[in-house]
Amino acid sequence: MAIPLSIYNERRVVMVRWKRARTGDPHRHYPDVDVRGTKTPEFAAIIGMMQDREAYVKMERENIDNAAPLFAVSSDAAKLQVLEPAGGTIPSGADTIIKLKALTGGNPTEVHLEIRFGSTTGPIVSRLLVRCYTRRRVTITPHVVTIHDGTGAGGTASVANVANIMTHVQAIWRHSGVEFTIGATQNETLNLATVDIVSHTPFPGELQTLLATNWVANTINVYFVRQIGTGNFLGFGFSRPTATGLGTNPGIILGDQTASGMIHDTAWAGNDLAHEAGHFFQLWHPNNQQPPNQREDTWSRRMLMHNHNLQGAHGNWKDNNSYGSVGGNARRGGLVTHKHITGIATDNETRTARGAIVSGPY
């Protein structure tokens, strides 16, 4: 039976779609899916997995009956194992969660999760490209800072929950095969001009003093403070190239709150820290576009390296990027890209980041 369709340039009809298997905070078992673009050489959607680790992905039926017999099959069972559903038999229904295990690593090793019709050897309905990565480790040194005034009195320590924040960071970067070793927390006390505040005016102001405090080489030094300045800044990141230009140490600074009372909750701070770590790994904002010309397409708003953590409220479908919201503002996503879309100069971020980690110093 012929189906008349109006087509301009290109139109793809897909039987099933691939999606992140949960909404809300990032999770080490639920990778985001790079579904951008349909051109060669990466026709398929892509996820990343760490060697010897498990992950879940959602398959949604789009243009195929909910009762059609479908089967999840690894193109190479020595590289990728389908753990659930049992025997790869996909149950009836609009969607299903598929559990996978990466058996090999590499930089990366590639294997396809295939959806087949009728049997495990039937025709392929869809493919998901799975990139399996050998683990690469990066060390972070956390500094929990108390800022007194010039007389050495009055300050309180940052209340950041370092362990929970790092759980978010690990969850985002695991799907690029990156794991963080967390060094012992350093408790720091500084005497600065104003209690609980590190000033950044005139720039870089007291940030230089902070970044020189018990700085540990060959790690990413992260300083948790009560407040940055008297505006609405919640974080700064100075990668090695940026720090060299400023004449200071590289490092990341995260504030608990702003002067206006915004609270840097754990998910927000974790995403910010993961984003700044991306800058250490030579990643930049999507297509290196800066405000007010930052990219606002839905792909970019899902990316970890988007310019803004809080995306603003558009009042339409753009507000739902699956990572939840704060005060009606969509949170920035956690996708570290795998594809290289033509025209996006900063794409295939996972490859760039892993290369930077190896070549160092990041």
Image: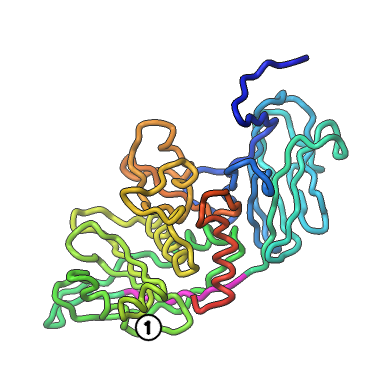
Say which quarter of the image contains residue 153.
Answer: bottom left
| Any part of residue 142 in sight | no
For the view shown, which residue lies furthest in the front direction?
9
Q: Which residues are magenta?
A: 136-144
- In the visual, does 150 lie left or right of 279? left
Q: Quadrant of the N terminus?
A: top right
- In the visual, does 30 lie left or right of 247? right
Vertical arrangement, residue 167 with respect to residue 218, above or below: above
Q: Magenta segment: does it hold 157?
A: no
Q: Main secondary structure of the magenta part?
A: strand
Q: Position of residue 168 (x, y in %)?
A: 47, 59
Q: Residue at x 57, y 73 (%)?
A: 137
Q: Residue at x 37, y 83 (%)?
A: 215
Say which quarter of the image contains residue 216.
Answer: bottom left
Q: Position of residue 49 (x, y in %)?
A: 65, 57
Q: Position of residue 31 (x, y in %)?
A: 59, 51
Q: Residue at x 35, y 35 (%)?
A: 314
**Residue that numbered label 1 is attached to:** 215
